[in-house]
Amino acid sequence: MKSPSVHIIILNWNGLSDTLTCLSTVTKLAYPNFRVHVVDNGSLANQAETIKAEYPVVDVLRLDQNLGFCGGCNVGIRRALDEGAGFIMLLNNDTIVPPDLIVKLVEASGRLESVGALSPVILRYPETEKVWFSKAKWQSDWKSGVAAFSLSDDADYATLANSVPYTSEFACGCCLFVSAEVIKSVGYLDERYFAFYEEAEWCARMRRRGLLSYVIPSARVYHRVGGSTPTLVMTYLLTRNRLLWMEENLPPKQQLLSYVVMAKELVWHILNYLKLIPKRKRHLSRDYSVAFLQGNKDYFLRRFGKWGPKAERVIFK
């Protein structure tokens, strides 16, 4: 019986070195029927041409502008579906994958019930036994001022390696495995998000159709955490998109609690912006607070998708 076709989609945005390193491991995957698409999100110089020259078997799609994680992945997903993909795997360019990754994800997909999306356990690199993602769970804690997803309860991989697959609120977009059938049912990534929280929204959409997200502990990926997005860009997008995701997906009681927690966070950043936080208590720069406040502002003004000119001046410093 022929193995189902798996199409891997990797985005490149001015990350040539990371992308080439990632491809050096992806092209060695021990699976008989896979295809790789690299979507170049309007990178500078000739990065798309360099990738194609280094890896001629890879399908390189060069975009004239940065469409974000959502828009870029959607371009790759459409190409993969047009080519008859059975499964699609979204993969960050700042990852390193072991040879058995797809084999384990395909096997798990065939065994589990009501599958929406799958993720492996994602380990930090180069601390290759330290867990970064093993389960997504929303948390609201007034004392700590946290209203966000927790991505792991585990310090190291040894505690997880032999566990059976289990459900998670979402499968992580760093490495997300989904069938073509599911995509045709629920639609593409929501491009309002541009990047960050998009997989949480996608998996919430799946869940409303009775489809679950799973983590496959025997499968693993290594990730250079924070390597692909500038810090202030990430701060702005995480802030804005968290509010959008909460608005559309949290139950009312949990939503209210989360807004109360975030009000505390908002006050701190306003005071930090105004330089009213004593130096000994400042744990974040003023630029970080400016990006955070801009994310809040654009959410309330309903400015989604790619950042506008005002936000660009704030997040690229």
Image (tube, rainbow, N blue to C red):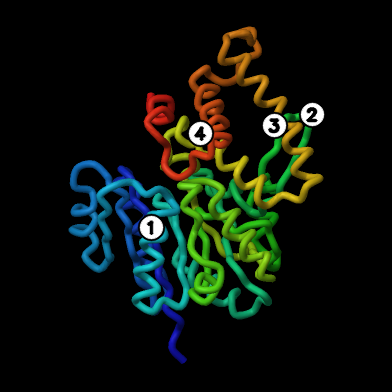
Q: Position of residue 198 (x, y in %)?
A: 53, 52
Could you tell me which residue is drawn at 56 percent across and 42 percent down?
241
What is the residue that sits farthest to the front in this orientation? 301
Mark 2 neighbour class, 10 Å CA radius: few under 14, some 14 to 19, many 20 or more? few
Q: Identify the disc placed on residue 262.
A: 3
* Residue at 64% in and 59% down: 204
Asked which quadrant contains residue 2, the reply is bottom left
Q: Which residue is mark 2?
A: 143
Q: Separation of disc 3 and disc 1 at Cα?
A: 33 Å
**Given the current orientation, which residue lies at the most extreme right position?**
253
Comparing 272 with 216, the one in front is 272
Amino acid under disc 2: Lys
Give the residue displayed 67% in from the left and 65% down from the top: 207
Which residue has dot 4 on it?
Answer: 236
Residue 270, relative to residue 15: is it above or below? above
From this view, report whether residue 131 is shown above or below residue 26. Answer: above
